[in-house]
Image (cartoon, rainbow, N blue to C red):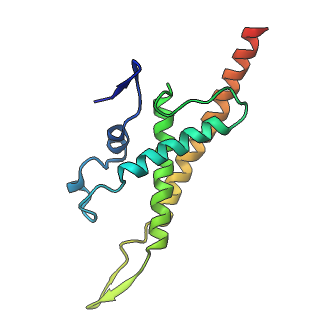
Amino acid sequence: MADLKGGETFLTENDVRFWLRDNNPELNVLLDDYEFTPEEIRQALTYTQDYWNEQPPYIGSIDYDKTPYRFNLLQGTAANLFFIAANSYRRNHLQYQAGGLTVDDSDKAQAYETAGARLWEQYKQWVRMNKRTINASNGWATF
């Protein structure tokens, strides 16, 4: 269920978890927990919205809980979460052998990095296109 703030629906932690299939710890067999903490999700939302706000043309800042662009914010947030996870997997990667069995359960950095890069590139292209469109529209409106 979407939260309401100021009469507008904004992207929630549950929306992000559902899209990433991180909404049921029992289905995360290797982790037996959520993959992403609420703080990581909030930070990823913030990083994604910060990118929008800091890219030219500067057409004003929007907080992530006030943006009307839910799907694109979701894509950028997922990308940032994948980058966060990739950094963690790189830092904690250790292949080991025990009883003739080789275990490498943290060898996921590249897969997460690739998934994040694909989503982030889509988000960046959308930001460029959408901000130019808004800027041009604002310019014609004042002309």
Name the residue located 48 percent from the left edge and 47 percent from the top edge.
44
Image quarter for residue 125?
top right
- Say whether residue 26 is left or right of residue 57: left
Q: In the rendered image of this protein, does residue 10 appear above or below residue 98?
A: above
Give residue 29's position: percent from left, percent from top. Answer: 24, 62
Q: How many numbered marks have been drawn onto this rendered protein structure?
A: 0
Of the pair 97 and 140, the residue shown nearer to us:
140
In percent of the image, x 73 and y 19: which residue is there?
136
Q: Is residue 96 left or right of residue 45?
A: left
Q: Nearer the viewer, residue 107 or 77?
A: 77
The x and y percentages for residue 52 are 61, 36
- Between 24 and 62, the one nearer to me in the picture: 62
Q: Nearer the viewer, residue 104 or 14?
A: 14
**Residue located farthest toward the right when viewing the structure as drawn:** 143
Quarter of the figure with the N terminus: top left
The outermost residue toward the left is 26
Which residue is painted at 32% across and 39% down in the image?
A: 14
Which of the image's four quarters has the C terminus? Answer: top right
Q: Is residue 56 above or below residue 111?
A: above
Who's the residue at 49% across and 34% down the image? 64
Q: Residue furthest front?
A: 6
Q: In the rendering, at what x and y percent does residue 31 appear? A: 28, 63
Figure quadrant of residue 93? bottom left
Residue 142 locus on image (x, y percent): 75, 9
25 versus 67 height, above or below: below
